[in-house]
């Protein structure tokens, strides 16, 4: 499942915050105080800090590529949306 959601950036002191969809948080069993891994360059990826097998990481990166295509074409809504079909873009 790929979640596509538009979020607002909130300033908190000198930092900025963006909320993460609750479906993702619940799906990974994350609770307040848990750590996540943040990878950033042209895009930002947030990974749960629990071990993930190589196939799951590969599928997640393919999903990110699908999201990038959607964003480039402006085909996202102002409200959260769920795209079923995983990395094949359906």
Image (spheres, rainbow, N blue to C red):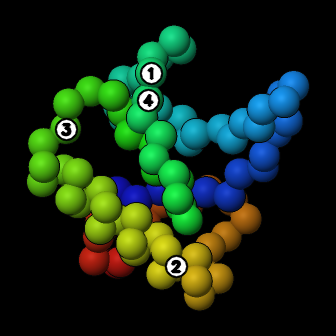
Could you tell me which quadrant the N terminus lies in?
A: bottom left
Going 49% across and 74% down the picture, which residue do you hit? Answer: 68
Are the two marked residues, 1 and 4, in contact with CB atoms closer than 8 angstroms?
A: yes
Which residue is depicted at the point 20% across and 30% down? 51
- What is the secondary structure assignment of the residue under circle 2? helix
Query: Residue 58's spot in the image, x, y percent?
Result: 20, 59
- Mark 3 Cα-neighbour bin, 10 Å: few <14, some 14–19, many ≥20: few
Q: Residues within 10 Å of mark 2 (few under 14, many from 20)?
A: some
Q: Which mark is residue 36?
A: 4
Question: Is residue 24 something that shows in the picture?
Answer: no
Residue 52 percent across, percent down from the top left:
19, 38
Position of residue 21 measured from the top left corner of the image (x, y, whole percent):
56, 42
Corner quadrant of residue 47: top left
Mark 2 or 3, closer to the camera: 3
Q: CA distance from mark 3 to mark 1?
A: 15 Å
Q: Earlier in the sequence, mark 2 or mark 4?
A: 4
- Residue 63 visible: yes
Mark positioned earlier in the residue sequence (3 or 1) = 1
Rounded to the nearest angstrom, the CA distance separating label 2 from label 4 is 25 Å
Q: Is residue 53 above or below residue 79?
A: above
Residue bearing mark 1: 35
The residue labelled by disc 3 is 52
Q: What residue is pinned by disc 2? A: 70
């Amino acid at each position: 499942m790929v979640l596509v959601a538009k979020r607002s950036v909130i300033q908190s002191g000198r930092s900025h915050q963006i909320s993460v969809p609750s479906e993702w948080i619940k799906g990974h069993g994350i609770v307040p105080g848990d750590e996540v891994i943040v990878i950033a360059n042209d895009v930002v990826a947030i990974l749960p800090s629990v071990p993930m097998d190589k196939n799951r990481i590969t599928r997640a990166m393919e999903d990110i590529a699908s999201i990038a295509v959607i964003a480039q074409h402006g085909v996202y809504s102002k409200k959260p949306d769920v795209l079923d079909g995983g990395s094949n873009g359906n």
